Image (cartoon, rainbow, N blue to C red):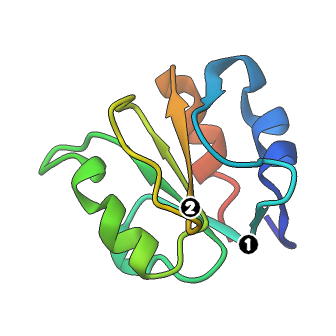
């Protein structure tokens, strides 16, 4: 993803029918990069909180938000939106993860 784009455009390109907006405005949220490692998150990042071999990315949502994530994509519907800092989305299908992470710079 060479330039920042709206979260709405990113979702439309990846898999619009597999993502449910839980909180926030996807039209205004600008995504500069996508990452699934909270240690690499910075301002403008979409953090993909997905289950992994060693743990679940959902455990690192707060750290990602504190590091500047503007949005979070997660398989866990129970995640609570962070007030005025991040937009939380529901990942309904793992087929979304690969195209999104493939768009990172």
Residue that numbered label 1 is attached to:
32
Residue 26 shown left or right of residue 88 in the figure: right
- Looking at the image, which residue sits at the far left? 54
Residue 45 shown left or right of residue 61 in the figure: right
Q: Residue 29, how many percent across, how many down?
A: 77, 60
Image quarter (top left, top right, bottom left or bottom right) of the C terminus: bottom right
Q: Residues within 10 Å of mark 2 (few under 14, many from 20)?
A: many
Badge number at residue 7? none
Which residue is at a point 79% across and 64% down the rendered structure image?
Answer: 1
Vertical order, 7 against 21 (above or below): below
Q: Residue 92, how many percent across, how many down?
A: 51, 20
Which residue is at a point 29% across and 48% down the rendered structure image?
Answer: 58
Q: Nearer the viewer, residue 32 or 61?
A: 61
Which residue is at a point 51% across and 31% down the rendered structure image?
Answer: 90
Residue that numbered label 2 is attached to:
86
Q: CA distance from mark 1 to mark 2?
A: 14 Å
């Amino acid at each position: 993803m060479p330039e920042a784009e709206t979260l709405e455009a990113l979702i439309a390109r990846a898999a619009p029918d597999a993502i449910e907006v839980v909180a926030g405005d996807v039209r205004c949220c600008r995504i500069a990069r996508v990452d699934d490692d909270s240690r690499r998150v910075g301002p403008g990042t979409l953090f993909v909180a997905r289950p992994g071999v060693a743990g679940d990315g959902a455990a690192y949502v707060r750290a990602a938000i504190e590091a500047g994530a503007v949005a979070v994509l997660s398989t866990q519907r129970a995640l609570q939106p962070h007030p005025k800092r991040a937009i939380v989305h529901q990942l309904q299908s793992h087929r979304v993860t690969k195209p999104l992470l493939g768009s990172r710079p």
